[in-house]
Image (cartoon, coloured by chain):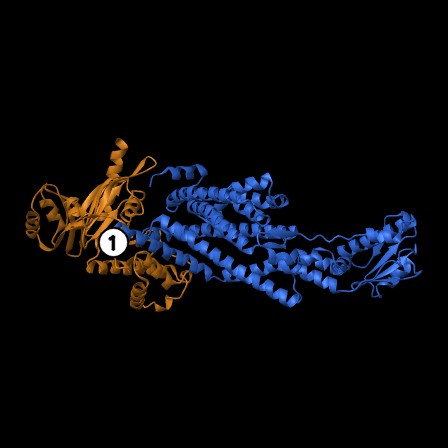
Chain colours: A blue, B orange
Amino acid sequence: MLSAKQINNQSMNKISIIIHREYVTRVKRTSFFVMSIVGPLLIAAIFIVPLWLQKLESAQVKNIAVIDESGILVTTLKSTENVVFTDMGKMTLDDAQKGFAKSEYYAVLFIPKNILNSTAVQVFSNRQPDFGLKQYIAKLIERDLETLKLLKSNVNPDLLKAVQTPIFVQTIKWTSDGHEVEVTMEMKTIIGTVASVLIYMFIFFYGSQVMRGVVEEKVNRIIEIIISSVRPLQLMIGKITGIMLVGLTQFALWIVITFSVVWMAQVTLFSEPAVPKITNQTATIDSKVMAQVQALGQDDYQYALDIFGSVSNVNWTLMISCFLFFFVCGYLLYASMFAAIGSAVDSETDTQQFVMPITIPMIISLAMIQVILNNPDGSIAFWMSMIPFTAPIAMMARIPFGVPIWEVVLSSSILIVTIILMAKLAAKIYRTGILMYGKKITFRELAKWIRYSS
Amino acid sequence: MDFISVKDIVKEYSGTKALNNVSIDVEAGSIFGLLGPNGAGKTTLIRIINQILAPDSGKVLLNGEPITASHIGRIGYLPEERGLYKKMKVGEQVVYLAQLKGMSKAVATEKLKTWFQKFEIESWWNKNVEELSKGMQQKVQFIVTVLHEPELLIFDEPFSGFDPINANSIKQEILALKEKGLTIILSTHTMSSVEELCDSIALINKGQKILDGKVQDIKQKYSTNTYEVKCSGWFDSMASTLTHNYQILEHQKEGNITTIKLKLLNEIPTNDLIRHFTGLGNVIAFNEILPSMNDIFIDVVGETNQQSKHE
C-alpha cells in the first residue's frame, strides 16, 4: 500500500505530465508561432505608424498658392520650413484651377475680398487637404485678422505684442522622487484600450482553447482511456494550467517582441530622441518652445511625439503585472466555464448555445470600454471592476489612469472567490459530462449534474 | 485465488438502478466473460472496476485489497468507444498514456520500441494518428492497453469494428496474454468468441446478474439431453425399435450412413443408448449436443424479461 503522501505526489506528478502535454503540443503548432510574430507587429504598429506618418507628413514642404482678393492678408502670411505661401497676385481662381495639376502647389488658399467682414476662406486642392493644415491656416488667419482688427481700433502695436501669449501646456506629475513628465491622457486612453482589448482576446482565445480541448477528447473518445488513469479533476486542472502557460508564453513573447520592434523603430525611424527631455527649467516658455508651437508640421509632429513619446513614461511594470494578474484570473474563471461546456456537449457545433450566455459579460465590457475610458473613476467603471465577469477587462482599461489600491484589492478578492466557486461547479459538471453521450443537454440538466454526489 | 472480486455493487442513475447488487469473482490467470444485452450495465460495472465511477455501495477487491488509485497502473483497459488524439504522433502519444499509468518516460519508450518491433510498425512512430487506418489505430490502442504491463486486462467489446482477420489476431493476442498468466475480463456480444476464449462468465441483464459460472458447467446445466448418433444400418428398423425413452428430432441418410439427432426423455445412462444402437448397426460417432452460449444467452435473457413483465 502506498501512503497518502505518495499518492498525493503521484497525482501531482500526473497533473504535471498532463500540463506538459497540453503545453508542448500547442506551443509546437505553427499557429502559435504565427500568432507570436503577427500579434506584436500589430501592437507595435499601433504605436509606430501614426508617429511615422506624422513624421513623413511634416518632412514634406507644402507650397500653398495664395489668391488674396482683399490684398490684406497676403503680406502677413509668414512662410515656415514646412509651409511656403506664394502670392499669386491677380490670378483668378479659374486660372489657378486650370494650371493647378501641372504646378507643384499643394493647395490654393483663396481669401475673399470682404474678408474683414467674413468668417470664411477656402482651400482648393486636388487631394484631401490634411486636417493639420486646415487648422494651421485657420489659426494663422484668425490671429492675423485679430491683429488687423485691433490695430484698426487704434490699439498700440506694442501692447498687442505683449498681450499675444501662445500657450504650450505641459503636464508634469510630482512623484515621491521629484517630478516627471506626465503621460498624456491620449496615451493613457490608447494604452487602456489596447490593454483591455488584448486581455479580452487572451481570455476568450485561451478560454475557448480549453473548451475545444475538452470537446476534442470527448469526440475522439480518448477520454475514457485517460480517466481510467487519472481523476477527471486532475485532467481538468492539467488542461487548464497547460493552456494558461501557453497563454503566458505567448504574452511574454509579445511583450519582448513588441518592445524590441518599438525600440528598433525609434532608433531607425526617429534618430532624434523621440521623447523631448523637458526639464523643470523649460517650464518657463523659452523661444525654442515658442518656435515649436508656431511652426506648423513641427507643431503636429511635436503633438504626436507628446502623445507617443510618453510611452517610455508609462509605468510598464505596473501595467504588465496587472495584465498578468487579471489575465490569469479572468482566464481561470472563463476556462472553468468553457471546460464545463466542453464536457457537456457531443460536438463543437453544440457549444454555441452555451458559449453565448457566458460570453455576454465579456462582450458587454468590451462595448463599455469607451465609457470607462471617458470616466475611469465613474460608477460604471467602478461596478464593472467589482463584477468578476467584467472585472479583468474593466480594470485593464482603468489601470493606466490610476485605480485606488483598495478597489484593486476588493476587485481581486471578489474575483478569486468567484473563481474558486466556479471551478468547483465546473468540476462537477465536467466529471459527469465527459462520460455522457447522446443526451440533449440543457441548463436544467447541468444543474442536475452539479447536485450529483461524487 | 480470485484476482478481482466485485462485491454487492449498487449504482443508481437518477432513480434507475444501473447495477443492483452485482457480485463477480474472477480467478487469477483466467479469461472472464462479462455478457449481457445492450444497456444491461456491463460498461457501468467495467467503469467501476476502473475507478472511473464510484459505486453507491459495495466494493471491489484486487488481490484481496480494496481497490484504490494506487492500483491504476496494474490495470489495462481497452474501452468500447476508444480513440486517440488525432494530431499527436503515435510514439509520443502511447508514451504519454503509459506515463499517466505511472510508467517513467524512459521505460515506456524502451518498451514501446520492443512492441513496435514485434508488430513491425517502427515506421509509425512519428506519424500522426490521423494518418493511420482504423485497423492500424486499433493496433496502437491494443499496445496502449498492455504497454504498462498490467496484471488485469479489461477489454470492452474488443472485436467490434474489426474485420475477421484483425479480430482473429486480437483473439490470438488475448490468448497469448492469458498464457503469460494475466487475468482478463472480456465484455462482448460475440458469443462464438466467448466459447473459444472464456473460462467463466457472468450474464447481466437489467442491472442484475442472472447467471454465472464456468462455461463448461453452464453448458452442462443447460444441456437438453440431446445426442447425435452416426451409424450404418437401416433407419426404419432403428426407429421402430426405439422405446418411449427417446425422441427422434432429426434423421438423415447419406448412402449407407444414417445420422440421427435424438433427445433422451428419461434419466437413463447414455451407455444404454449406445448399446441399443450397437445391436442394430455399426456406430461410427456418438456425441452430446450442448447448447451454444448464444442459445443460452437468448433463453436466459428472454426468460428473465418474461418474468419481469409478469411481475
Residue identified by numbered label 1 = B193
Q: Quadrant of residue B135?
A: bottom left
As drawn, the residue found furthest toward the right would be: A90
Residue depicted at x 48% and y 58%:
A249
Callout 1 amino acid: Ser
Q: Quadrant of residue A362?
A: top right
Q: Is residue A358 left or right of residue A292?
A: left
Res A430 visible: yes
Q: Nearer the viewer, residue B267 or B199?
A: B199
Q: Is residue A324 left or right of residue A217?
A: right
Q: Nearer the viewer, residue A24 or B268?
A: A24
Q: Is residue A161 left or right of residue B276?
A: right
Q: Residue A143: percent from the left, percent from the top?
A: 83, 52
Q: Residue A267: percent from the left, percent from the top?
A: 63, 67
- Neighbour tally class for label 1: few under 14, some 14-19, many 20 plus, Cα within 10 Å: some
Res A121 visible: no
Residue depicted at x 9% and y 45%:
B241
Q: Nearer the viewer, residue A158 or B46?
A: A158
Q: Is residue B191 above or below residue B126?
A: above
Q: Is residue B110 above or below residue A172?
A: below
Q: Nearer the viewer, residue A238 or B181?
A: A238
Q: Is residue B293 above or below residue A89?
A: above
Residue depicted at x 88% and y 48%:
A118
